[in-house]
Amino acid sequence: MIFLFRRLVTLLCCSLFTAIAVATPKVQLAKVYDADSVIVSDYLVSEKYDGVRAIWTGTQFLTRAGNTINAPAWFTAPLPKVWLDGELWSKRQDFANLSGIIRTQLPVDNDWQNVSYMVFDMPDSSIPFSERYKNYLGLVAQLNAKHIVAVEQKRFESNHQLSLYMDDLIANGAEGVMLHLASAVHRSGRSDALLKLKPYLDAEAIVIAHLPGKGKYKNMLGALKVRSAEGVEFKIGSGFSDHQRQFPPAIGSTVTYKYHGFTKHGLPRFASFLRERNAL
């Protein structure tokens, strides 16, 4: 009895993406958008929501890894007995808070009032995404539940139009955009049928040291140690050509680097060399 009680307490206290004996859902995974190899007019485009991927099986929510998401009964009650794909989402730039809500073992109704299910696909291996889009639009409209939202898809004729759209989203705190190949039927795995496009940020820093390379970069530059305008010191180890590794920016020079947000320690994430300022 003591063992059973302890086991029950453990189950109640653990974080809830509860692993159960469910097969991993067959979901589409995104490749990175490449403007040089993609005809943007072939794609339907939507905002990339920084939420938690959630597959509705017709009876329950699963993560991409096949773990159960415990949502309140009222939240799932309107959902139909069909397969849907989407994101559980609260608002832009709120992922940490949202993740805490979703991972709670016993869902808290007040917290889930701030969560929406953003439906972006109604998987069907026999019809193209352009038709699936129409299908999920119609379905969500029939459900008429304010927390279940159909993700709007747009179409653009040029990369310039796409860039303008994304720039507007980013300026308002969005994470990026997703591109669905309109003609593609649903197939699991990573392919050009689903692409993601996220911006990078850039900034400048002063070179304060050259760190030696190893392996194939022996006797060349391994990384630059730099200092940002805020006084933060960090390393930039990628983005260099072999020539730049042989003749790196001088100590004291200013370089531009790109990065994707910050780590919990306040360092630029995935910092990569772009160019030396004023260099040709």
Image (tube, rainbow, N blue to C red):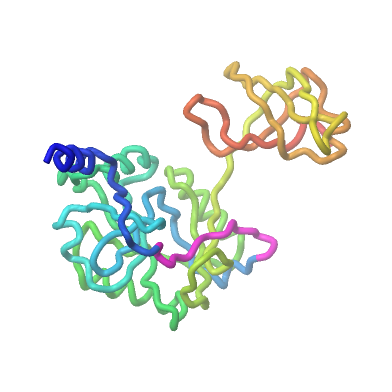
Q: Quadrant of residue 82?
A: bottom left
Q: Quadrant of residue 173?
A: top left
Q: Residue at x 64, y 59 (%)?
A: 34
Q: Is residue 27 magenta?
A: yes
Q: Find residue 252 and report its horizontal and vertical position in percent.
A: 77, 18
Secondary structure mostly seen in the magenta stretch: loop
Q: Find residue 206 and report its horizontal and vertical position in percent.
A: 71, 21
Q: Residue at x 48, y 46 (%)?
A: 170
Quadrant in which the N terminus appears: top left
Q: Quadrant of residue 39?
A: bottom right
Q: Is residue 24 above or below residue 172?
A: below
- Which contiguous range is marked in magenta? 24-37
Quadrant in which the C terminus appears: top right
- Looking at the image, residue 2 sits to the left or right of residue 274; the answer is left
- Looking at the image, residue 190 sits to the left or right of residue 10; the answer is right
Q: Find residue 32 and report its horizontal and vertical position in percent.
A: 59, 56
Q: Residue at x 26, y 40 (%)?
A: 14
- Looking at the image, residue 70 sits to the left or right of residue 154; the answer is left
Residue nearer the viewer, 165 or 117: 117
Q: Is residue 30 above or below residue 217?
A: below
Q: Find residue 85 and report its horizontal and vertical position in percent.
A: 36, 64
Residue nearer the viewer, 269 or 220: 220
Q: Is residue 250 above or below residue 24?
A: above
Q: Is residue 98 magenta?
A: no
- Looking at the image, residue 161 sits to the left or right of residue 137; the answer is right
* Residue that protrudes farthest toward the left in the picture: 1
